[in-house]
Amino acid sequence: MKKKIVVFLLIAFTAFNIFGNNGSSALAESRKVILGGDPAGFYMQTRGAFVAGLSDVITENGILSPAKDAGLAQGDVIYYLNGIEVNGASDVERVVNLSDKEINIDYIRCGNSYSTVIIPATDLIGEKKLGIFIKDDVSGIGTVTFIDGIKIATLGHPVLNENGELLQILSGTIYSCNITGYVKGERGIPGELRGVIMKSNEIAKIDRNTEYGVFGTLTDSHDLSGRDEIEIGEGKMGDAFIYTTINGKSPKKYSVSIIKADTVLTDTKNYVIKITDKELLEATGGIVQGMSGSPIIQNDKLIGAVTHVFINDPTRGFGISINNMLNK
């Protein structure tokens, strides 16, 4: 049996019910929401200071490696320096400049908490350095799944850090996005949408990054006039559509086939879909990164969202049930 290799579809990112309904699928199916499908740009300020890499420091006494000597590694997330919370490069720099000698570091690695001591090195221009590169935020392109009142649901999967863990965020913003092109997916090489994030057009503030997607609250200025409503449903094997954008800002329907449906035993990989639309196959090769969150429609009902592509077969991928996005 061949192993399926899948990738999340956000270019670069047990949940809860933020919509205030109970977990009943029957109740969820009677509801209507505003259909998504439009591309979105994401910016997230991470919790803690993410160590993107290590570096040496050139000093009057030679080359020193404070972070390496202290046992830090790429992928660690620093939460405290000398007991002071840090959430980015500027926080780290401020604490280091205020410190005399040793600095106590509390950090997370692969979900476990650790502490160590680091001695900053002074470089040739007199600045104190720890010998680390800090990544302040995460950005990428994805797709809106639906809007319910003032709440917006996107992606259908979590944004993870480089260690494959749920990214802890302090804040974030969802912006409008204009898709300007794409890289066609091939067997073994996932394709991707390419676009311009329109920071002048803010859609929502991000509330939570969860196993079931990224959720937010719409800004007061976001215009919902003329948007289509759609009833919630539950999918089954058979013909369906995905609603996604591969050019500009306006989504289109593309035909797919649901070849496997499991809305009971699986929380996040409820559907296996196969792209059958000739136009989409010719253009992108199938599912590409940036399509995560693209609504799946069957019998004129919203039944789920695209979440992954099979890297060894870009015509196929996973989808999550819309009821799981609503009720978790």
Image: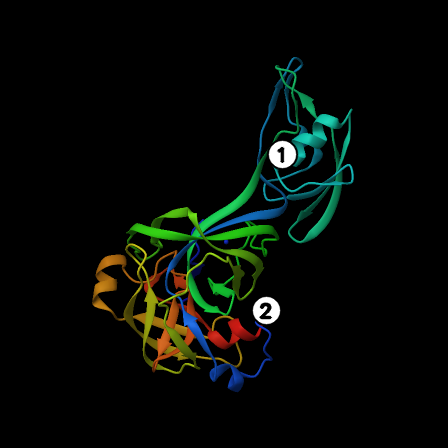
Mark 1 or 2 closer to N-term?
A: 2
Pointer 1 residue: 90
Q: Position of residue 231 (x, y in %)?
A: 42, 80
Q: In which quadrant of the rendered image does the C terminus lie?
A: bottom right
In front of the other: 48 or 281: 48
Q: How is the image coloured?
A: rainbow
Q: Nearer the viewer, mark 1 or mark 2?
A: 2
Q: Position of residue 173 (x, y in %)?
A: 51, 52
* Residue located 68% across and 48% down the image: 108
Q: Secondary structure at mark 2?
A: loop
* Residue located 44% across and 55% down the image: 10
Relative placement, left or right, of 172 versus 238 is right
The numbered mark at residue 18 is 2
Q: Position of residue 278 (x, y in %)?
A: 21, 67
Instruction: Kindly report the distance in space between the C-alpha atoms of the residues bearing marks 1 and 2.
Output: 32 Å
In front of the other: 170 or 72: 170
Q: Amino acid at mark 1?
A: Ser
Q: Amino acid at mark 2?
A: Ile
Let me know if residue 116 appears in the view: yes
Q: Position of residue 91 (x, y in %)?
A: 66, 36
Residue pushed farthest bottom?
26
Let me know if residue 267 appears in the view: no
**For residue 185, above or below residue 303:** above
**For residue 279, above or below residue 126:** below
How crowded is the residue under tag 2: few (<14 C-alpha within 10 Å), some, or many (20+)?
A: some
Instruction: Report which quarter residue 256 is drawn in.
Output: bottom left
Instruction: Report which quarter residue 242 is drawn in.
Output: bottom left
* Residue located 60% across and 25% down the image: 56
Instruction: Report which quarter residue 164 is drawn in.
Output: bottom right
The numbered mark at residue 121 is none
Q: Exactly how many numbered labels are in the figure?
A: 2
Q: Are marks 1 and 2 in contact (CB under 8 Å)?
A: no
